[in-house]
Image: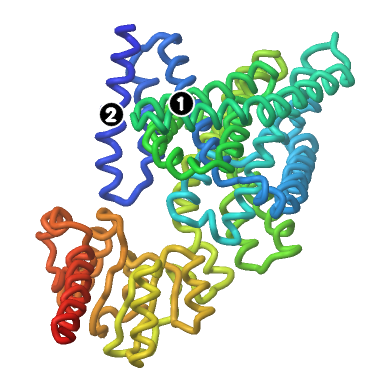
Amino acid sequence: MENLLFTIFLTITIATILNIILKKFGISHIIGYILTGTIISYFFNFSKLDMHSLELLGEFGIVFLMFTIGLEMSFDKIKKMKEILFINGSLQVGLSAIIIYICSYFIFDLGLEVSLIVSLAFSLSSTAIVLTYLKSSKDIHTPYGEKSTAILIFQDLAVIPILLLITFLANDTLSISEVLTKTFISAIVIIAFMFIVGKKIISWLLKFSAKTRIEELFLGSVFSIVIGASLLAHELGFTYSLGAFIAGMIISDTNYSVKVESDIATYKDLLLGTFFFWVGTKIDALYFLYNVHIILLFLLAIMLIKAIVIYFIIRRKSDKSTSIKSAIALCQVGEFSFAIFALATNDNLLSSEQSSFLILISVLSMIITPFIVSNIYKLASYFVVEFYESDKITPIKQKNHIVICGFSTLGRIIARDLSEQEVPFVIISDDLRHVLLARKLGYMAYFGHLDKKPVLESLKIEQSSAIIITLSDIHVKRLVCEAVLNYYDEANIILKIQSTKEKAELKDLKINKYIHAYHEVAKLLINEATINLEIKKQVK
């Protein structure tokens, strides 16, 4: 127990220090977690039991990620996206696996069984990294985000038959019909239990724990539901994440979905960090140095094959921009490849050297993925440019205009009033749904982040009369204000704040005007009340 606690302490400490340093260079925290795992595995001799415990915690990071995805996937939404979920998903996994198999078997001469395992494992993409980015950037609501999410969900479902196939290849006593029958029966059991009995239990548990108004009891209920559903799915031969995904779907039809997601967000991110740490422990630096040319060749070939396949699948019914972004987002190898390679190695279908080689390819693709997805608009812009590209906005032909940052309720009201007064303005938002709505209303609007220099240049911040920031998150406000002032220190920033505490936290910044939301509302309410009082006095 003491060794495990020390392992956890050392892991968190190293990861925190590394990520503080990497953050200054704009490098994803995922890289920090992976590097932590590599450092721990090379310089500290921890027991296999301790490392296995952290591996198990990391696996539940993916479980909670899939649970939050399930919260956004109600039955109605699944019905609407059934085509992109099942057709695009099956085409992507099938075609990618076939092409990779042909290359592995005929070009790299890996053998029949090894080529089959490699092709199936490498056809999968990284749910943990891509969905984490899509949710944090709000790109999950964009056309490419929806299509990427659908394919990732199908891939998670595809892991089940892939693992069963490997078990069948390693076991001469079971027939394929027996394996399929057992799987089919297990699938019926878990679906029937979760949607008939489980739904009632989940609704009852959330309802009564919410009534207690004790936060830890509600959180305990959520953890019980997620872990219980995951264990049930695992016992029936499926992945932990499938059970969590179904539990999330059930809760999405209740009134608690938003609260549940907000309550577990921090825990999910911490557990995901543990998962990426475990990925880092799989890196064999010496083996990589000796085989770097072959590993990079294989990696480039796989990512290129997957990108081309995904592009043409999405392009059938989508525009070029959506197809390119989807291809870039999903061209890497996913975390479930580790489970496939581990099972194949344990069943003597892969040698330890082959396993190390294949795991390194998976790890390297996951290392470069954060750099790819965080610059996905910039990369896509080399092939196609649209009006809402974040890093490729055509410079506007405006002067003395107002820049509205954010287009939620407040941003819409401001835009409407400015439009009525015929005051020139431009809208910038990191939510594509808001940008498309603004464009539909006839406003000049762009999708992007105001903390990026190319966006600031394109919007001509230095020639604007004011920048109105309507955002709510204090950290995003600071990020945007700092970027604007670093770019043009005379910028006229008008910032909406929620409290005096926010103003105190931002006092080091050169902000011209703070608008306290509640103070201004209070003044209007008082004015209306006193006007009514004056009218009554005049009547008397």
User: To which quarter of the image does residue 246 belong?
Assistant: top right
Q: Is residue 308 above or below residue 352?
A: below
List the residue tagged with mark 2: 14
Gap between marks 2 and 1, in whole Å? Answer: 32 Å
Left or right: where does residue 499 sit relative to residue 309? left
Q: Position of residue 245 (x, y in %)?
A: 60, 35
Q: Tell me what residue is drawn at x 61 percent, y 23 percent.
A: 355
Q: Nearer the viewer, residue 204 or 52?
A: 204
| Residue farthest along the front direction in this orientation | 540
Residue at x 27%, y 89% (from the top left corner): 400
State the image quarter where residue 73 is shown. top right
- Residue 510 lies, with reference to residue 49, above or below; the image says below
Q: Which residue is mark 1?
A: 221
Q: Amino acid at mark 1?
A: Ser
Q: Image point 75% across, 28% down: which residue?
A: 161
The percent coordinates of residue 285 (x first, y second) are 45, 28
Residue 504 x %, y %: 11, 56
- For image coordinates 42% across by 24% down, the residue present is 220
**Circle 2: is it few (<14), some (14-19), or many (20+) Cα within 10 Å?**
some
